[in-house]
Image (cartoon, rainbow, N blue to C red):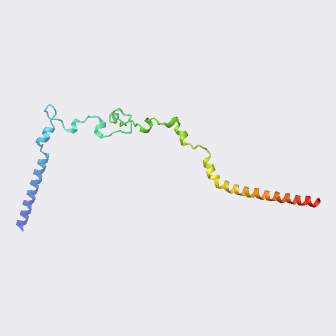
Amino acid sequence: MGSDVAESTDDRRARLQALRAAQELLAAPTPDSTIASLDTNGQQRQPLEQEQEPDGASDTGIKFRNYFPRDSDLQKAKHAPPVIPKFEDPVATDPLQVAGGEDPIVSIAPKKPNWDLRRDVAKKLEKLERRTHRAIVELMIEEEKRRQAEAVDNMEQD
C-alpha cells in the first residue's frame, strides 16, 4: 500500500511540474511578441495600460453617443454623430412627362364629378321611374274615363 501512495505522489508531482512549465511558456515573451512590441524606431514600446491617456474618460471606457456631457473632461469622450448620406428621391428628381400638354392631376380626375353619386342612386332612380310611368298611365286612364263620362252626359242632355 505504501507503493501506491508513493506512485500517486510521484504522478502528482509530475503533473504539477508540467503545469508550471506550461504557465512559464505562456508568460514568456515569444519572438513575434517582442517584434510587435517594438515601435518604428526599434525601441521597446510601453504596454497598453501605459499608452492610454491619463484623462478619466478613456480610463472608464465611456462613449457618449447620444448625450453631450457638461464636464470638459467627459466631452473628450463624446463621439461625433454618424454621417448620414443624403437621400435623393429618384421619383422627385425626374421631371413629370406630360403627354399632350395636359395636367396629370386633371387626367386622373373623373370627367363628371358626380359619376359616383349617379352610380349609387341608379337603382333607386329606376324604381322611381317605373312608379312614375305607372302613375302617369293611371292618371291618363282616369282622365280618359272622366272625358268619356262627360261625353256620355253631354249626349244624354242633348
Residue ID at (53%, 37%): 103
Q: How many marks?
A: 0
Q: Position of residue 53 (x, y in %)?
A: 26, 34
Q: Is residue 58 left or right of residue 26?
A: right
Residue ID at (22%, 39%): 49
Tell which of 118 and 4 is nearer to you. 118
Relative to 71, residue 114 above or below: below
Tell which of 27 and 9 is nearer to you. 27
Q: Furthest residue to the top?
A: 41
Tell which of 39 and 140 is nearer to you. 140
Q: Is residue 4 left or right of residue 107?
A: left
Relative to 98, residue 135 above or below: below
**Could you tell me which quadrant the C terminus lies in?**
bottom right
Q: Quadrant of residue 5 in the image? A: bottom left
Q: Position of residue 117 (x, y in %)?
A: 63, 49
Tell which of 101 and 106 is nearer to you. 101
**Could you tell me which quadrant the N terminus lies in?**
bottom left
Q: Furthest residue to the right?
A: 158
Q: Position of residue 73 (x, y in %)?
A: 33, 33
Relative to 102, residue 144 above or below: below
Q: Position of residue 70 (x, y in %)?
A: 39, 34
Q: Furthest residue to the bottom?
A: 1
Q: Quadrant of residue 89 in the image? A: top left
Residue ID at (82%, 58%): 144
